[in-house]
Image (cartoon, rainbow, N blue to C red):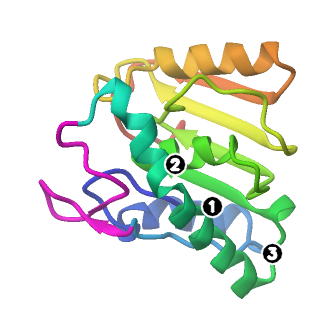
Amino acid sequence: LFHGVGDSAQGLAPLGEFIAGHFPQAAVVSIDSPHFCDFAAGYQWYSIQGATEDSRHSLVTEQMPRFVAMVQHWQQQLGVAPEATCLVGFSQGAFMSLQSTQQPVFLAGRVVALAGRFTQAPAKPVHPVVIHMLHGDQDAVVPHHHTVAAGERLQALGADVTADVIAGLAHGINDEM
């Protein structure tokens, strides 16, 4: 599990407990991003201070080797192959998880993105991965049209993807999601 900017691994504990309750054979690991948040308590993958639409992709790309290393560390610790790995990210954690599908390394067989987006128009993933994107239609932080556009693009490319928009949900996670 990968949290959003200004949060921590503990913030996704309720989601982790929900997942563990439905998949008791799974190991659920919630990971703090590596940098202290520069405007609030908690952590971040990269600073959003001054980040623009043009710079966001390079900020994510700069952090991707560290993201990949963290996932591979836990795969090794738990003896889990990429095919059996699911990355679940919220907001900035979803940005990282989604962009990881565009890397040459096979990191996970499934990615679930909650209120996040690709930082660059996606290509069909090089490796087989199922992508689930869920997004609130009232999200003013990360507008849901990015999820809809990425889902349509990936479907046109033949990728295994779903893009669900949750009515009335702002930037967050609810029970339906």
Residue type, numbered disc 1: Ile
Which-is-in-front pick, marks 2 and 1?
A: 2
Q: Secondary structure at mark 2?
A: helix
Of helix, strand and loop, which mostly describes the magenta segment?
loop
Label 3 crowding class (10 Å Cα cut-off): few <14, some 14-19, many 20+? some
* CB atoms of marks 2 and 1 within 8 Å: no
Q: Name the spot of residue 166 as percent of width and height, x first.
A: 50, 23
Q: Residue at x 72, y 27 (%)?
A: 123
The residue tagged 3 is 80
Q: Nearer the viewer, residue 114 or 67?
A: 67
Of callouts 1 and 3, the N-terminal one: 1
The residue tagged 1 is 19
Relative to 143, residue 58 above or below = below
Residue type, numbered disc 3: Val
Mark carried by residue 96: 2
Relative to 26, residue 89 above or below = above
Relative to 111, residue 116 above or below = above
Q: Secondary structure at mark 1?
A: helix
Residue type, numbered disc 2: Met
